[in-house]
């Protein structure tokens, strides 16, 4: 980081012995170590706070994306629910009247020739075919 070689370290040690003296040198080294530890802990705390901020920003972004996806997925369901809940207009054609028994009259189905087909043959047809 600082690119300090062995010769520079030796020069700093010699100057420290000359100016501080051998008696106070251990206390100086301990104080420098404590300051270095404080600086490292402050730098670590600063870095952690930025990492936490980045994580929160990413989480907020992910929450927003999930909410958008959920809203996009729920929109068709909400549209269907609204269409089911809204009343549909009824046709203006009158209903077919019921006969005396209360049943709606049946329309006979047509055969391929365009003639109505009888569902139950009458007694006259059976008797004519047997004679």
Image (cartoon, helix red, strand yellow):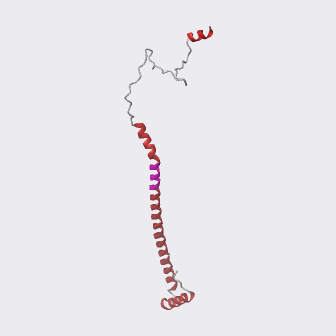
Residue at figure coordinates x 44%, y 46% from the top left: 75
Relative to 38, residue 130 above or below: above
Residue at figure coordinates x 56%, y 86% from the top left: 5
Residue 62, how many percent across, how many down? Answer: 47, 57
Residue 126, how many percent across, how many down? Answer: 59, 11
Residues drawn in magenta: 64-72
Residue 24, how many percent across, how many down? Answer: 50, 86
Quarter where residue 98 is shown: top left
Which secondary structure type mostly characterizes the magenta part of the structure?
helix
Residue at figure coordinates x 45%, y 61% from the top left: 57
Q: Which of the two residues, 79 or 116, is positioned nearer the viewer here?
A: 116
- Farthest residue to the right: give it: 130
Q: Which of the two residues, 104 or 125, is positioned nearer the viewer here?
A: 125
Residue 19, how many percent across, how many down? Answer: 48, 90
Q: Does the magenta stretch include residue 70?
A: yes
Residue at figure coordinates x 47%, y 62% from the top left: 55
């Amino acid at each position: 980081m600082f690119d300090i070689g062995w010769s520079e370290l030796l020069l700093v040690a010699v100057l420290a012995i000359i100016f501080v003296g051998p008696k106070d040198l251990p206390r100086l080294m301990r104080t420098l170590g404590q300051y270095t530890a404080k600086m490292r802990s402050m730098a670590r705390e600063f870095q952690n706070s930025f990492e936490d901020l980045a994580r929160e920003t990413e989480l907020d972004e992910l929450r927003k994306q999930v909410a958008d996806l959920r809203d996009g997925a729920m929109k068709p369901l909400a549209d269907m629910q609204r269409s089911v809940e809204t009343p549909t207009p009824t046709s203006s054609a009158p209903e077919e009247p019921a006969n005396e028994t209360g049943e709606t009259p049946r329309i006979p189905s047509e055969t391929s020739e365009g003639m109505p087909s009888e569902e139950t043959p009458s007694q006259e047809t059976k008797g004519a075919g047997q004679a």
